[in-house]
Image (cartoon, grey):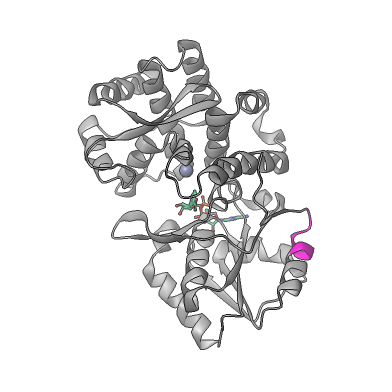
Amino acid sequence: LKVPNYIHFTDDPTTTLIEIIESAKPDKLALLVDENTRLWCLPLLERFSADLIIEIESGEKNKNLNTCQNIWQELTTAGFSRKSIMVNLGGGVIGDMGGFCASTFKRGIRFVNIPTTLLAAVDANIGGKLGIDFMGFKNHIGVFNNPMAVIVTDKFLDTLPKRELRSGYAEVIKHGLIADEKYFEKLRDSTFPEMDWQEIIRHSIGIKGSVVAEDPLEKGRRKILNFGHTLGHAIETYYLNNEKSLLHGEAIACGMILEAHISYQQKLLSKQSLEMICDYLSSIYEPVVIPTISEINELMIHDKKNVGMTINFSLINAIGSCLFDQQVSDKMITEAVYCYGNLK
Ligand SMILES: NC(=O)c1ccc[n+]([C@@H]2O[C@H](COP(=O)([O-])OP(=O)(O)OC[C@H]3O[C@@H](n4cnc5c(N)ncnc54)[C@H](O)[C@@H]3O)[C@@H](O)[C@H]2O)c1
Ligand SMILES: [Zn+2]
């Protein structure tokens, strides 16, 4: 497995961060946090100090151009230069947006990401995708760029709400399903409270890192990481306009059940594997109310991953193996939605 060279695993994030910063010799240092990571995560970096702390309000709804403008303004007012460094301490929102702001400020300054959620550690911080939401479209404006360093530790997970932990875990399960059968089995044999998160994070980063290394700009094989995401994304978008909230991983867990079902209908996946996947996912994630088939179609047409009108799926042809650019008929989607309804 290929772990990107900018990833630093550590049990002592303060020392690792201080060493990286000292050898990089910035003229100024900014730290980006939200109210939760300031409260819960910053105290774990006890000997670290920044010239400027920028605090933004947490949440996906703030991952937008307005917040970027505030960040760029604060950097400008505090006299930041191209020799400065920005440290982003937080989940995927902070990492994606902080990285985007750093990558565009004065045509790009160096930045260090410190993921504090499981999702950010196993997914958002590997692969160089940075950006913000725009006009209701997720990650619509952004760039590909890698951080100078990503500091990875499971130390921050203790304060993470359990629901957020479970949401990030969906991407971990996905890594097993698309690329590593043994990993999936190991996950299935463990129980939630006694997970070795540092080990899981390391392995998941290895899987995503290897896939991304082969195809950094998502022209081909990197698309396997989208398993569960074509329908999952539609469900996530549907819930944006719903009073009930649904986290990304919760939507993806549902998307993986549906897309495993489609994989089965396409005769790629055995019935036995399908049942194993559905049983495991349903043991962790509550069933959710999903949009109707016509609503799903409407939502998917706007999905930027689709070229023209054909909707391409990444489907698994066994546990631990995935195909991309698979065309799926409406009938199969309808059938999968129907079966999901019967799971409950
Ligand atoms: N760049 C990529 O390749 C990529 C991949 C997947 C997801 N993403 C992006 O990641 C974002 C989602 O990331 P997320 O799930 O980390 O959500 P998030 O960044 O919104 O964090 C979730 C919540 O947990 C809080 N929090 C963070 N760390 C904490 C801690 N240690 N203790 C207590 N509270 C803590 C945050 O303040 C927030 O309220 C989305 O915007 C998504 O688009 C990007
Ligand atoms: Zn995802």
Q: Is residue 295 above or below residue 39?
A: above
Q: Residue at x 49, y 62 (%)?
A: 58
Magenta highlight on residue 93: no
Q: Could you tell me how many numbered marks the image carries?
A: 0
Q: Position of residue 197 (x, y in %)?
A: 69, 41
Q: Quadrant of residue 53?
A: bottom right
State the residue at coordinates (53%, 33%): 174
Q: Nearer the viewer, residue 78 or 226?
A: 226
The chief SS type of the magenta part is helix
> From the viewer's perspective, is 205 left or right of 321?
right
Quadrant placement of the C terminus: top left
Q: Is residue 344 above or below residue 107?
A: above
Residue ID at (72%, 71%): 21
- Residue 38 rendering spot, x and y as whole percentages: 61, 66
Residue drawn at x 23%, y 36% as measured from the top left: 297
Which of these two is toward me, 308 or 295?
308
**Can residue 177 be seen here?**
yes
Report whether residue 163 is seen.
no
User: x, y (%) of residue 260?
Assistant: 43, 24
Based on the displayed image, in which of its 4 quarters is residue 166 positioned? Answer: top right
Q: Where does the image place residue 40, in percent across and percent down from the top left?
A: 65, 60
Question: Looking at the figure, which quarter contains the N terminus?
Answer: top right
The region drawn magenta spans: 11-16
Q: Is residue 14 magenta?
A: yes
